[in-house]
Image (tube, helix red, strand yellow):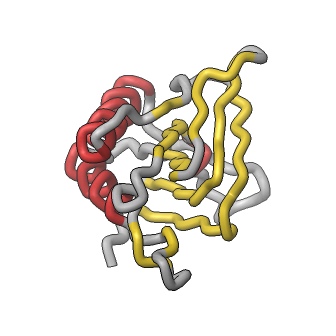
Amino acid sequence: MRILIQRVNEASVEIDNRIKSAIKIGLLVLVGIENDDTLEDSDWLVDKTINLRIFDDEHGIMNRSVLDIDGEILVVSQFTLQALTKKGNRPSYIKAAKHDTAIPLYEHYCRQLSLKLGKEVQTGTFAADMKVALVNNGPVTIWIDSKNKE
């Protein structure tokens, strides 16, 4: 699994010209799921997401997590994070998981985040045509791949 985390002042998802979900200060997380991803990958990324210290403390140092600041999280499925771009100019999505694998892992990731955050995580709609808006704070954008746990 790959996630792209953005520290935001606000973020929202619009589907069919209607706001489906919106948050204020917190994290916008884009999630890309690969064919061979497992619950272990999801759980590892949940812990990384919830504990990642990318919010400023009282000294302006990135030393607080989304938990520490009582922030919010918006999670959006993003199969294009699994794009292969080595050959040619047209990305290949052959490694992106099919719905029967991706949806349960996406839902598990969101449920576990909600449990650990202590409040509901906002989401997009899997496989929908979504318009994602955000005000990136920093900007701070972090990419994490569960297959690269260095």
For the point 44% across and 30% down, which residue is it? 98
- Compared to residue 83, the image places residue 7 above or below, namely below
- Compared to residue 8, the image places residue 34 above or below, namely above
Relative side of 52 to 27, left or right = left
Query: Is residue 49 something that shows in the picture?
Result: yes
For the point 54% across and 56% down, which residue is it? 4
For the point 69% across and 62% down, which residue is it? 87
Which picture quadrant has residue 64?
bottom left
Q: Residue furthest left?
A: 40
Q: Where is residue 65 shown, x and y percent of the image?
A: 39, 64
- Compared to residue 56, the image places residue 19 above or below, namely above
Query: Is residue 146 something that shows in the picture?
Result: no
For the point 65% across and 35% down, which residue is it? 12
Relative side of 138 to 5, left or right = right
Q: Residue furthest front?
A: 58
Q: Where is residue 147 shown, x and y percent of the image?
A: 35, 63
Relative side of 105 to 90, left or right = left
Q: Where is residue 123 shown, x and y percent of the image?
A: 50, 31
Residue nearer the viewer, 99 or 15:
15
- Compared to residue 98, the image places residue 65 above or below, namely below
